[in-house]
Each structure stands twice: as structure tokens, then as C-alpha cells.
Amino acid sequence: MDFLSEHQPEMLPGNRQLPPTQGVIEAPHGTTIVAVTFPGGVVLAGDRRATMGNVIAQRDIEKVFPADEYSAVGIAGTAGLAVEMVKLFQLELEHFEKVEGAQLSLEGKANRLSTMIRSNLGMAMQGLAVVPLFAGYDVDREKGRIFSYDVTGGRSEEKGFAATGSGSIFARGAMKKLFRDDLSEADATTLVVQALYDAADDDSATGGPDVARRIYPIVTVITEDGFRRLTEEESSEIARSILARRLEQPDGPRAALL
Amino acid sequence: MSTPFYVSPQQAMADRAEYARKGIARGRSLVVLQYTDGIVFVGENPSRALHKFSEIYDRIGFAAAGKYNEYENLRIGGVRYADLRGYTYDRDDVTARGLANVYAQTLGTIFSSAAEKPYEVELVVAEVGETPEGDQIYRLPHDGSIVDEHGSVAVGGNAEQISGYLDQRHQDGMSLAEALKLAVQALSRDTNGSEREIPAERLEVAVLDRTRPQKRKFRRIVGRQLSRLLEVNGAETAAEAEDPDEEK
């Protein structure tokens, strides 16, 4: 934000002096975020685990945040920096909306996030990368859209589905086999939890549904009615039904061979 | 070489106050009322783009009468103050009292500085609480003083007459439709006591609604929603006129 950089530059992540370090800094990292579009909106979901090396730092971390009424960010990478980035991003969208009296376009929001990731490049080079996934409902085009990023701030729009974080390769594989163009909202929320389950299955840094502690993935839906986070009951319902099926078929639903 | 005239400080201040008051009086009045679920802002505004009311923060709204460029400047300053404070500390640490203090300082400094002309604005800063008792309304006249108001407040050209009218009729626990009706009645009274009709298109209405599930309680009421609210009143008055004994 221009005003902040003039008045209190030390508040902005990009303006801090980096201490010289050797080796990788140990800090909690967030892991898998997935997003899927469906006709009428987009679903963004994330697991609940934060890891620090081989230690589970937190079991119930929240990695999906509303950015404003029609968009949300899911974060993978260094948790502390990512949460701060999201906070600043939320502030900036809200500030723009209040001052200008109109919302930024979805493209505008995505571009702004891109600049913020780029300003963190110095930290990223020291192993403190932040790689978010941005999803929102485009009010002008009347559809859900997903944007993925790399550490340098490179932005690319994804068609259909996307994933970020250490478990993203497995999640993407699962989504590739399950995704269809005509998903309903309920299908899409089930699909993301399936993908997170597969990611947790093969990636040690991604947490699966924790039935004993009642910790389930965070699932959010953005449609023309705005942002909505599924309640604890709703997401536990989805996770439990998937779990019940997996007891019979541990690898999940089978796709046709040809 | 000419000697400048001596002007006593009292006279200088009186002149500046007079100047600011005249500027404010040229604009249309607006009113801010408490109702059971929050605070409603009502004003006459032919423009759809240049708002008199706006959101400052989650629970805080802003209303201004007077010169547009001056209050717009103050509004943006207020949004910056609130956003910076909320980002540095916490969203709960942004309060209407703090904001009103900042405005009072700004307006007061400008008013008493000889180098600048006084701002021709009168502001209202309102914060909606969890309960009606928690609501706060501050009125900030052009000279930088703060007036803590309850129930109803009017600012702008015809403010004195309108607030007199409101004080007599405003009650705690009014519904939104009732408060809106009272506000429109108050605004339609002219200086000479005659009444005129204000069409719905010329009304600007916004509320700070404590029942809103989102963090941000500010909401504009426009278009169909506004005409529906005004119609509720129309229907009620019509029903009352038809059968005045019904409620007795």
C-alpha cells in the first residue's frame, strides 16, 4: 500500500532488512491447498497441518482465508509470512473498496497478490517462500476462476482445478481423474476433500481428516452470493463419508481405464 | 506603505465561523438516527456517485454535509487512520471515539490556522454497538469541537429546525421503516415551514446494521429495497387512515 510505504515502511514485508543466514531457517510451513471450479462458482480448500522439518508444528492451522466478499486465498509455504501477506492483502482490497467506492476486478486482485509475492523474493531465496492459491468469483464474467503463483510472483490462470504446496502433486493427480465440467457445488466440495485425502495419503507434511480430534479440512465456496466457509458439521460430514468409502477402497474412487 | 487594519482575535474567529457556517448552510441537510437494530443515515442527494455517507470501518460510518472536496479529503484520511490502526493492532481497536478525536484535531487546527481557510464541513461519526446502549454518535462542527449525541442528529443547512423536529418525535426502539419515515418527514420540511416531497431517487440511505452476520456492518439501501421500505410506511399510513380505531 502506497500510504503505508510512505508512513511506516517497516510495516511492509518487502522492506525489512534480512539478516545473513546459513542453511535453511526452521519455521512452520503450511502444506496442501486445492481449488476446483464448477458452473456457478469455485471451491477452495486446505488441510490443517503445519510442519517444521519432520515435526508437526500445528494440527489445526487454518490456511484458507477470505480475501474479500468474492475471493479467497489459500496459503502454502512459511506460515508466519503467509498469514501476514494475507492480512495485508485483505486490508488492501478493503481499503481500495472503501476509498474508491467500488471493488477491484478479479484480475486486479490477482495482479496485486502477484506483486506482494514478488516483494518476498529475498526471503524466498533463504527458504522462506510463500506460494498462495487465489480463487474468486468473477462478477463481470459470472464464473469462478483460479490463479496459481510461483515464488517469483509469476501468475497463471488455471482451468478447472489447481493445487499448491508439498502435497500438490498428489492432489493434482487425484483431481485430474475426478474432475468434470458439470460438477455441482456438492460434487466440487467432495472432490476437493478427496484430493486432500490423497495428498495426505502420500505426503507426510499434509494432514488428513483427524477423526479422533475432530479436525477436518477447511472448505470454502465462492459463488455469486459471496464467500462461504462450510461449517464444522458440513465438512466433517463430507470427510466422514469419504472415510467410510475408503475403508472399503483405500485408494479412493476408480476412474475408467479407457 | 499602508498599515494593515487591526482585527481583534474575537472578530477574526467570529468571521471565520460565520464563513464556515454559511458554506455548510448552502448544502442539503442530512440526519442520522438510531433504530432498534442499528443506526440509519438519511439525506437528500441528487448524485449517485458522490456519496454523503460512507463506511470507515467494520462498525463505523461517516456522514458529512458541506463542501464535497473537503469532506472527501477527511473521509479518506479517516479510512486510512482506521485501516492502519486495525492492521497494526486489531480490528477491535478501531473506535469511533478515536476517529472523532482525530477529526476534531484536524478540523480545529485548520479552523484556527490563519494561513488556511476554515473547512466548510460538518461531520457525523457513528459506531454501532452490540446493543442499542453501545451505539455512539458524534457530531463534529467546523471548528473542531465534538458533540456526543444520542438518538438523533441533523447536520447541514437546516439542521437546527430538523433536529428540533426529530428530538420531539424520535423514540428508542423504532424499526428501520419507522426511523426512515421520520427522517424523510424531517428532511422534507423547508426553512419556511412548508413541506415538499422528496422522491426515492433523490434519497441516499445507508445503515450500520448490528444484525448483519459479516464483520462489516455498513450497508447502503438502494433501489428496490429502499422503495419497499418506503412502501411499508405508505401502506401503514394508508391502513391507519382507513381504520383509525383499529389499534385502540
Image: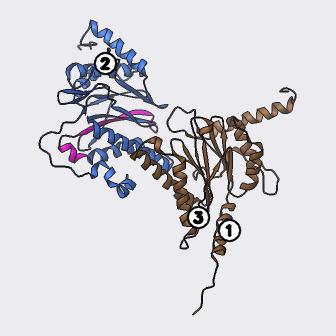
Chain colours: A blue, B brown
Q: Is residue A137 above or below residue A182?
A: below
> Residue at 46% across / 44% down in the picture?
B93
> Residue at 22% across / 18% down in the picture?
A201
- The percent coordinates of residue A26 (x first, y second) are 18, 36
Of all chains, the one bearing label 2 is A
Pick the quarter of the image with the C terminus of chain A. Answer: top left
Q: Nearer the viewer, residue B19 or B177?
A: B19
At label 3, the amino acid type is: Tyr
Question: For this view, does A216 lie left or right of residue B247?
Answer: left
Q: Secondary structure at mark 2?
A: loop
Question: For this view, does B91 lie left or right of residue B40?
Answer: left
The answer to whether any part of residue B55 appears in the image is no
Of all chains, the one bearing label 3 is B
Residue bearing the label numbered 3 = B119
Q: What range is drawn magenta here?
A: A120-148
At label 2, the amino acid type is: Pro
> Residue at 11% across / 44% down in the picture?
A22
Question: For this view, does A138 lie left or right of residue B3?
Answer: left
Q: Which mark is residue B18?
A: 1
Q: CA distance from mark 3 to mark 2?
A: 60 Å
Q: Nearer the viewer, residue A64 or A42?
A: A64
Residue bearing the label numbered 2 = A209
- Disc 1 or disc 2, which is closer to the eye? 1
